Amino acid sequence: MLFLVLTLVCAGVFLLTCAVFSPDGGAFLQLLYELSAAVLPWLGMSAILRRCQAAQGVRQMEGTRWLWMALYVLYIACVWTVTGAGTLGEALQNGVRWSCNEVNLHPFSQGIDPSGYLLNVLLFVPLGFLTPLLWDRRDRFHLTLLGGLACSLLVELSQLVNFRATDVDDLVMNTLGAVLGWGLFRLFARLTHWKRERELQWPMGPEATVGLLFAGHFLLYQEAGTLI
């Protein structure tokens, strides 16, 4: 229960900050709706699984670890928003589109965009940093590479149902960002002597966490004007 309260408080502080600095109240409500669609299903499932773990006597994650988890979940939800991940409503309205103008499968064939590449790299750095920090068994180079690739592929494939371009360059840069994030975590762990507590378990792994957050966004979020 304490975890749920503290997570909601953190989310509330973040959203309140957005409201204060956003001149458009409608845009803020839309942002609140989009983030809630992704986070609330995960929050409910986590509460159920944590209760089951507690009943079995499994030691729960505590201290500052839950803060990192709250940050991780909010970050993933923001990735869906920033990248314009597709939704079920868009799929029903637009169908799946595959054309040369909207899909690029040839790396770096449409010119070099340094600022765009940099933003795509930076976007996935937190993924590579936070994943091994929360799940020590994922502290492997190849797992980080595959995780970044899978997460980016999820976004790119979902964009086949909306009017955003699906680009292999984004896939490459996102994956590179995740790998760089993992490198920063390794440096952080070495400099701070990060303490690993293998006995502390979260009820879901990163794959289930990202998958549930994506499913919530895909199934529950409907952009204004969709299906109207």
Image (cartoon, helix red, strand yellow):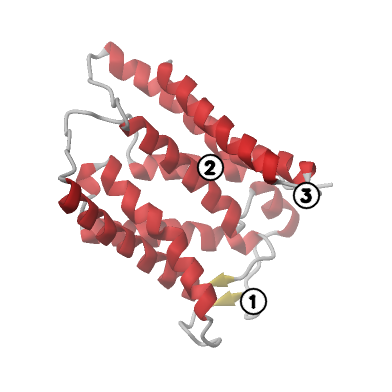
155 w.r.t. 176: above or below: above
Q: CA distance from mark 1 to mark 2?
A: 26 Å
Position of 95 with respect to 159 (left or right) is right
Task: Please give the residue where the numbered disc 2 appears in the rendered image.
Answer: 215
Q: Could you classify mark 3 by the number of other residues whose Cα lies within 10 Å: few (under 14), some (14-19), or many (20 or more)? A: some
Residue 136 position in % (x across, y down): 21, 43
Q: Which is in the foreground here, disc 1 or disc 2? A: 2
Q: Which is in the foreground here, disc 3 or disc 1? A: 3
102 w.r.t. 128: above or below: below
Marks 3 & 1, CB-CB < 8 Å contact: no
Q: CA distance from mark 3 to mark 1?
A: 22 Å
Residue positioned 47% across, 60% down in the render: 123
Marks 1 & 2, CB-CB < 8 Å contact: no
182 w.r.t. 100: above or below: above
Q: Amino acid at mark 3?
A: Thr
Residue 60 position in % (x across, y down): 27, 22
Q: Secondary structure at mark 1?
A: loop
Q: Which mark is residue 99?
A: 1
Q: Secondary structure at mark 3?
A: loop
Residue 189 position in % (x across, y down): 20, 49
Q: CA distance from mark 3 to mark 2?
A: 18 Å
Nearer-N-terminus badge (3/1): 1
Task: Please give the residue where the numbered disc 3 appears in the rendered image.
Answer: 226
Residue 85 visible somewhere in the drawing: no
Quadrant of the drawing holding the N terminus = top left
Residue positioned 39% across, 59% down in the render: 125
Q: Amino acid at mark 1?
A: Ser
Position of 57 with respect to 221 (left or right) is left
